[in-house]
Every structure is written in structure tokens, then in C-alpha cells.
Amino acid sequence: MPSWNIRPQGVQGQLQVTGTHASDLETALTTMMTNLSEAAQAAGTAVPGSQAFTRLQGPVAPGQAPPSQGAMGPVAAALAEYAEERQSEYRAMAERIQAAVTGAAIATREYVEGDLDTAREAQDAARAVDLDLLADLGGQT
């Protein structure tokens, strides 16, 4: 990369737009996980009513009902497995967004200050999703 030509105001504007979209994505993922949980609870079970709860063993305070755990039906189990399998993908999305935004901000700051080596290092760290290095370079990760 022999020369750079960055417009810091343009980068700042794009980072604000990206931050807004990242917030929208976070809201959508949170809503999706809430909806999956509610769907799993509403799906019911494939067992008769009296067997829908498993009584847990252990001491019970006087006047309290014994603790129990609800049985999980096949739909609830499938939804739980789906959410668990996607967890790492959602985490990776969040980390990539965080690395891209932080890396762009650091690289731009260093460019303005004339430190092209650190700017390049921040850019490379963002590409590699190295949040620890970005934090070391002064980013808010």
C-alpha cells in the first residue's frame, strides 16, 4: 500500500452508519432469541400431563411445593439445538463488526497523526479480527 488518501470525516460518517446497523442487528438477534425461547415454551411436550414435570429431589422448605423441571418436547429440543449451533456464528458476526469499526477508527486516527505503520497494523488486525491487538493499539474493544 504505497500511499493512503483517507477522508477522516467520511470515515467517521460511515462508522456512525455502521454503528447504527450493528445496533439494529443486535436488537434483531436479541428479539430472535427471545422468540425462539417463547416458541420452545409454547410448543408443549409429547408426554401426558402428569409426566410433563419431573419432581426434583432434595429438601423443601415447609409450606413450599417440591421443585420441578418441565419436560422438553421435540420442538423445544430442536429450537434449543438450533440456537446453540448458531451461537458461534452470531459471536463471530459481532466480533467482525467490532474489529472492522475499531480497526477503521484506529487506522484513520493514526493516518491523521502521520503514523502509517500503526495505521497499517490496525488495518491488518481488523482484517484478522484480532480484538486483543486492536485493544493494545488504543481501541475501545
Image: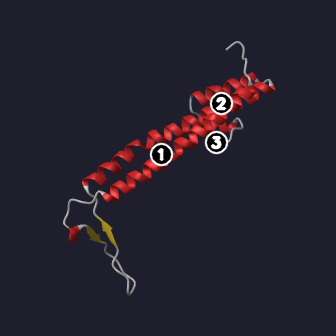
Image quadrant where one finds the C terminus = top right
Query: Identity of the amino acid at label 1?
Result: Leu
Pointer 3 local density, CA inside 10 Å: few below 14, some 14–19, many at least 20 = some
Pointer 1 local density, CA inside 10 Å: few below 14, some 14–19, many at least 20 = few
Query: Identity of the amino acid at label 3?
Result: Thr
Residue that badge 2 annotates: 14
Residue that badge 3 annotates: 141
Q: Residue at x 47, y 50 (%)?
A: 31
2 or 3: tag closer to the N-terminus: 2
Q: Residue at x 72, y 17 (%)?
A: 4
Residue 71 found in image quarter = bottom left
Q: CA distance from mark 1 to mark 3?
A: 20 Å
1 or 3: tag closer to the N-terminus: 1
2 or 1: tag closer to the N-terminus: 2
Instruction: Tell me residue 122's x, y (percent).
Output: 67, 29
Q: Residue at x 34, y 80 (%)?
A: 65
Query: What element does badge 3 sit on?
Result: loop
Q: Is residue 69 above or below residue 73?
A: below
Q: Is residue 69 left or right of residue 122?
A: left
Pointer 2 local density, CA inside 10 Å: few below 14, some 14–19, many at least 20 = some
